[in-house]
Amino acid sequence: MSTPSAISGTARNIRNELGEVKREEARLQAELAGVASWWKGSAGTALTDSYRSQTRNEINRLYSDIETLQTGLERLAAEVQRADEQRRIEARQKALKLEQQRNAKK
């Protein structure tokens, strides 16, 4: 079973990778703007229009999916932490009860 810190670490790594993807996408946009500045005509317009409509939507969907994954992992880490704490509490209560039973027999 994974620990809450391992799960949180994975969520953090995903967040960091998302930042890297966004930086790469910004570089791609800059390259595309550069191409659009010299590639005139219908072919150049088609390229930039395609990016702005279809590709941009797909990238936004990817960002959303990655953010959903990260949020889910953060929630999972919190739930595992709560479950671990509940198991510790129950184990302490059981140990205390056994101790009390032993003391009562003396």
Image (cartoon, grey):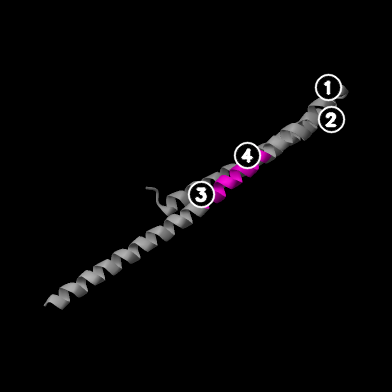
Q: Are marks 4 and 3 in contact (CB under 8 Å)?
A: no
Reading the image, the residue beneath label 4 is 21
Give the residues drawn in magenta, as a range. 61-74
Taking depth in this image into account, of 70 and 100 the one nearest to the observer is 100
- Residue 27 in sight in this render: no
Taking depth in this image into account, of 9 and 30 the one nearest to the observer is 9
> Does residue 69 appear left or right of residue 37 in this picture?
left
Helix, strand or loop at label 2? It is: helix
Reading the image, the residue beneath label 2 is 37
Which marked residue is nearer to the observer: mark 2 or mark 1? 1
Residue at (75, 35) in percent of width and height: 30
Which mark sits nearer the N-terminus, 4 or 3? 4
Q: Classify 69 as above or below 55.
A: below
Q: Amino acid at mark 3?
A: Leu
Reading the image, the residue beneath label 3 is 73
Reading the image, the residue beneath label 1 is 43
Which marked residue is nearer to the observer: mark 2 or mark 3? 3
